[in-house]
Structures are given as structure tokens and as C-alpha cells.
Image (cartoon, rainbow, N blue to C red):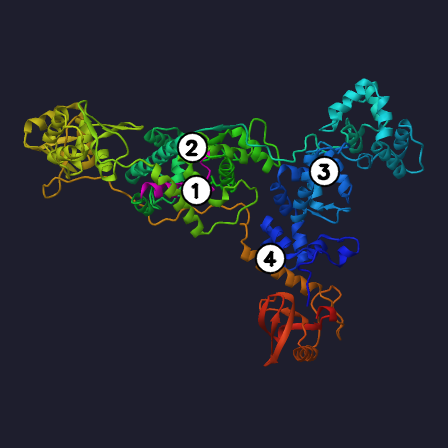
Amino acid sequence: MTTPRETGSSGGAARGGPRTLAEELRARPDGALARLLRARPDLLHPVPGDLTQLATRAGTRASVVRALERLDRFVLQTAEALAVAPDPCPYGTLAALMCGDAADDPRIAGALPGAVATLRDQALVWGGEDRMRLVRTARELLAPSPAHPSPTGLGPTVAEATAGMSPGRVQQIIAAAGLPGTHDPVSAVAALTALFEDRTRMAALLAGAPAEATAVLGMLLWGPPYGTVTADPAPHLRWLLDRGLLLPATPGSVVLPREAALHLRAGRAHRAPEPTAPELAPATPHSARTVDATAAGQAFTALGAVEELLTAWQSDGPLVLRAGGLSVRDLKRTAGLLDTTETTAAFWTELAYAAGLLASDGEVDERYAPTPAYDDWLHLPAEHRWARLATAWLAATRTPGLAGGRDAKARPLNALGPDLDRSPAPEVRHRVLALLATLPPGTSVSPETLLARLHWERPPRTPAEPGTEDLRTRLARWTVTEAELLGVTNRGALSAPGRALLGDGGDGGTESAEPLTDAEAGALAVRAAAALAPLLPEPLDHILLQADLTAVAPGPLKRPLAQVLSVLADVESKGGATVYRFTPASVRRALDAGRTAADLKAFLTEHSRTPVPQPLAYLIDDVARRHGHLRVGAASSYLRCDDDAVLAEILADRRSAPLRLRRLAPTVLAAQAAPDELLEGLRAMGYAPAAESAEGDVVVTRADARRTPPRTAPAPVPEGPPVPDATLLGAAVRAIRAGDMASTAERKPVAAPAPADGGLPRTTSADTLATMQAAVLTGSAVWIGYVNAEGAASQRVIAPVRVEGGFVTGYDHTADEVRTYPLHRITGVAELADEHA
């Protein structure tokens, strides 16, 4: 059997071109079908049974809308021109609509064949060059109407605008235009249309127009083509109405007919065709070395921000709102913790969540806390920690920029909330970085230049409300900002690690790339980490102690040193160097964690390049001397001290009233407050108490490092079906070809007539068995109807090789494999015509 897999034409094409889209798809080679399914993956779910089903699905409204949304501006302008052209439309007519009467624009002439080929590849246009047809659904979407004006700015044709007009009024119009009367309105409308399309006669008609009338036509020329008139129009408007240059649209409104507008436009459908993408210019060069070094510093800052956030939340994570997400108050508190804006704080929290380092714990009083993956992440080298964050950001559909806004129903959108996923986000991020990757290293362009290019590649289908921007524009702006925060870019230029993160996809092409496998994504992360590693500063193992109770870390510190120092001192300022300040509270915090004064001074001596200043040594000794002088236990709680004068002082202090203390013994006070409340209350009064166990030992208190149960990173929410890979495309094309062969192959007449509705073949059991046995002997293929165990009916073409035991075994051309079928489930059988056997 033969199929038109690699042929360029079919029987329908040979007889003057395909009569339907299905016939054109049938004539396409397998490679062209694969390109169609790749460009429009929604057509594959589920896989069409044959090419007729594929053509039908390609013409559905939802699929056509999705396909139109993925066209670049010039291809979309070509489709818009076809929507206002005659149907069918010769290629020359389309070229005239795009270029105008002069037809002297080589850019348009050179780009138009590619635009038509793109529309044809995506099954939006079919037919020969002399009879091109836009898919009916696409024409309905793009053709002008009062409710949905065309981007071309054109109005209805003369025939459409005069559809409800009385025959007498039509005769009056053609008479005023200088045309002879006709016997019927159809020929009158045709005569008026021919006048408007005749450049010479139309120019003569307009030569006699009043100047005011010409000005009115100029205002309606490029759209919108509708205007309003009063019941008693001015003379210049009356002149236009009498000659059909303005036709009634609705009571009180008129429209400029399409043919008249095209004459005034010199035949052009668009005011400004854009056959080529805007250049990424002007570009600003920077030193590539400076860009990479500064981006690496920002990457290190990003790691510190995420680590600081999760360190704070591991002991006191914020509550999860009932509707999900982070409250506004907690977001403000987080911004204060990180010393940044709320928008940036939302980005860091969302980044940690997207990387799987942060999640809700699932408890009754649900809180956010680090996941067990956070501990593994902390032990990675800095460059690999950054690569994990960057790859998670690039692939995430979470959109932190929406936090703080409201959705379409005016409900608040909270950081970490359930409504921040936006499917186009990964594509927009990747595209912005890919455009930057086409520039020389260290070169940047303005965000407006990037937006102009993105708008050409994917024009917004519907204009945004005044004062607002469409989603993809906002996503692009957020991408520029977030990439700077993360160190993927710096000064608007793509850094070397950011370039490595894109891999081979950063070539600036507009065609969708095949989805990356986990192994490929991991390889890109390794490449990005390798590019970042030599740019990161080496962690230091020392600090510089100063006499004003501060310590300066001249660079990033090694983790053990940074962890101890964060307990012993408070961060006063950050930047290229971090300044820590020692206070009584910070020293007490270290003592509460189980350290002694000797331990602290030994630690500082070991890690400081300068001697331990005397004020700092005195501070440590003073706090340590008072630390543990008071002991707190559980009574509800109790307070004991060997110095009864201290207890008397506490009792006499009015600030101790909320603790409800009373003396049990000269050295013991009982309190109604819990031990932790008593500790905090005494510390607020300026004392340094220590907790005591039931055995009388000092309790070393450390903040609990809470972790959630094992959690996986949130899966991105895809925008429609994923782009199929080559293996899936090949299998789908084979299945569609086999199903099409089964549904279109010619059959020999059978003893029992086929159903009137063209359904499954019907033969008796005896005829079915005899035909099968004959096919085994001759080695020919047959067409069968089959009903499976679930009752689903299908048609198949099989080549039987064995018939026995109530079963037939043969090669199923539809499934492209050997299968066995019970004979009692075969509704009928028919031999294929000789040319298909």
C-alpha cells in the first residue's frame, strides 16, 4: 500500500488545488505535519484519529485563538489582510494589500512569502497560490465588525454595509455617483463596488468633493471607520452620504466602506506594515569583566538574603492565612528583617518557595518553615546554591510582582498565595534573557527597547485598559528587575553565569525550544555554577575587632564563623563589608546558647586579626558574671537567688507587677507567669536570669530549628500542552496517517450493504470468517469494523496472518503493530480496492 507521505500533491491538488483543509493536510509530507503539531501542540490532545479530525480540530475557535496569539506582528498583519481580502484570495491581491499600489517596498515583498508559509504551516491558510483561503474561524476573529474592529482600521464592504438598505435608496446613491441605474439592488451594489475599486474613476469622483468632505474622509481613513451624524447633516456630509462614500451603520452613525478606504490608502491594508523585527538598539557597552564581577557580588547577596530569611523563619515562621499565603503585616515584617522593600521581600520568599526550600508545615496552626531540602542546600558550595535558585526562578510560573495587587474580582493577591501562578512567566523570562544573549558580552539595552521587540514577536491580542499594561509586558519588566536582584544580569547586561544558564537556547530565535529533560536542566545548572565559581569571593576565616564594640567582616565569612558571630553580635550594616555590634543582649544570647565567657573570648582571639579590645572583654565578663545569678524554674514558675537583697529589689520594682511574684523563702520567689514569660520579664527589667532544670542545673536554651515534613518544589503551571518532542511527533504522525488510510481507503462491495451513515462495515459471521481466511491465503489487507470490550467502535486496516480459535492475528496498519482480535467483536469486513491493497 502507498500513502502520500512524501509527495507534494494529491489527487485533489492535481484537479485544481485542494477543496478542503483536510485534503491539503493529506497532501503534506510527514515533516510538514510534524511542524504543524509542534507549532500547535493542542492539536495532539488527544491524538486525532485521521486527517479529517485534525483539520476539524485545527479550525476550532479555542485552537485558532491560541495559534493567532503566537504569531509575530508581520505574520499577524498578513492574516489580518487576508481577513479583509476576497475569499479566496490570489497571492497578488494579498501582496497589493500589504504593499499598496506602488508595490515598491522590497522589505515587505521579501518577507511576505515567509509569512504566508508560516500561516500555511500552522493550518491557518490553505489552498493554492491563486486561491488562498484563511480558515473560517480565523476570518471571523480578524474580520472587521462593529463589536470587534479590525486592527487594519477597515470597515465593512459596500455589500455588507448596504445589506439592509432599501433598493430605492441604493439606486439614488449610484445615480448621485454618476452611474447608470440598474434593474435590481444586487447589480447596483456591484456597480458601486466597481466604482470604488477603479482608481481612475474614484479619483475623478473625489476630485469634485468639498474640502470639508475630504477632511472627514481623512479622519476615518485609518480607523476607526465609524462616525456619527445628526438627522440634518451638514452639506459636506450630505455630499458623502449621497454618493455612498459614507453608508449608514446604525441610527445616527455612518461607516466608511472598505473599498473607498482602500482607495484613499493607495491599496494598503495597514498604515505601517512591520516586516522586520525592531533592532535591539541603541545598545550601551560596558566592561564585560565589570558586569560579571558585580553580578557575582549580587549573586552572593541573593544567597545571603535567602539564608537570612529562612534562618529567621526556622524558629518563628509566620502563620499561613486561611486563604493561603503571607499576610500583609508579615510581609512588612519580613521586609524589615531583610532591610529591603516589600516587593523585593516578596521576591525572596517566592524564590525560596519555588526552589523547594520553604513550605507550610501542615500543622493545625499552619506556619511557614524551611523544608529538609534547605539543610542539603546549605551544605552545597555557593555557586551551586545560586544555580539552584536561578534555575528555579527561570522555570517557575510563580509571579512575585503580583503580590500586593488584586485579582479580577478585587481580592488581594498575597505573597506565597495560591493565585500567583501565571503560565507565560517562564517563556517571557527565557525570551528576555535570550534577547540579551544576542548582544555582545557586557552590552545592555533599555527595557523599552526589549519591550518593543517582544511586542513585535508576540503582539497583544487585546489592548490593555488605559493606564495599565498587559500581562506579558508586566512580566517582562519584572524579569528585568528580578534578574538584576539574582545576579543573572547586571547594569542591564547578561552576565557570564546567566549566559551559561540559557545554554544553546540563548540564540535569539523565536521558535519554541523543545522541553528540557531533567538531565539537560541539571547540566545547564552545572555550567552556570562553573561560570560563577571563579567570580565569587573566597570566604574568610577572620574578622577585625574594633574598640567601639564592633567587628568588621571584610568579606563573606565561612559558615561556622558566620553562624557563631550571628549569635554573639548583631548585624549593624551590610555591604562590601559587614559590621557587627556587640551588646549586652547579644552576649547574653551567646551565654544562653551554652557558651562561657572563656569560650567567647577564646573564639574571638582565634578569629580576629586584631587583639580583643578591653571594652569587649569587660562586656563579656560583666554579662557573664550576672548571667545565671537568678534561677527560674517551674512552680507555675519560681525565681531563686542566693542574694535575698536582689529578690527584695525585684519585689519592690513596679515593673514586676505583671509577673505576680510572692516570696516563698528568703531566697525564693514564686510567680504565676510561665518560665519563659518570667525570663523575658526579668530581662526587660535589666536582669540576666538563667533557666533552671528540675535538678537545679542551668538549662541551655537554643531556638528550635523547625523543619516542615518533606516537601517537593511547586510544579509550574503550564500554558497549554507542552511542546512535544521528536519521538512523540513521529509516533503521532504515523498514527494519524494510519487512521486516515483506514478511513479513506476504497473498499470492494460487500454482500451486505454498508450502513447509510457511512459507519462500520456489516457482514455476517460466515462472510467475516471466509474473507479473513482468504486474506491470509492471498496476503492482502482488509478493512474491518471493531468494537472493543468497553464498547468503543473503530475502523482498522489489518493484514491477517492467522485465523484460529475464534481469533484473527495480523498486522494492524492503524496501530502500526501486530495485534490479535476476537472474531465476535468484528462487526464486518471488506476487501480494499486493488490500488490500495
Q: Earlier in the sequence, mark 4 or mark 1?
A: 4
Under mark 3, the amino acid is Ala
Instruction: From the top left corner, tell me how far across and down residue 167 is, in percent.
Output: 89, 35
> Chief secondary structure of the magenta span?
helix
Residue 96 shown in magenta: no
The residue under label 2 is 288
The Cα–Cα distance between marks 4 and 1, rounded to whole angstroms, is 36 Å
User: SS of the residue at dot 1?
Assistant: helix
- Mark drawn on residue 500: 1
Under mark 2, the amino acid is Ala
Q: Nearer the viewer, residue 419 or 558?
A: 558
Q: Nearer the viewer, mark 4 or mark 2?
A: 2
Q: Is residue 616 left or right of residue 267?
A: left
- Residues packed near mark 4 inside 10 Å, few (<14), some (14 to 19) or many (20 plus): some
- Mark drawn on residue 81: 3
The Cα–Cα distance between marks 3 and 2, rounded to whole angstroms, is 45 Å
In this picture, which residue range is highlighted in magenta?
381-401
Under mark 1, the amino acid is Ala
The residue under label 4 is 47
Q: Nearer the viewer, mark 1 or mark 2?
A: 2
Residue 833: tell me if it is visible.
no
Under mark 4, the amino acid is Val
Residue 372, above or below 73: below
Q: Nearer the viewer, residue 527 or 560?
A: 527
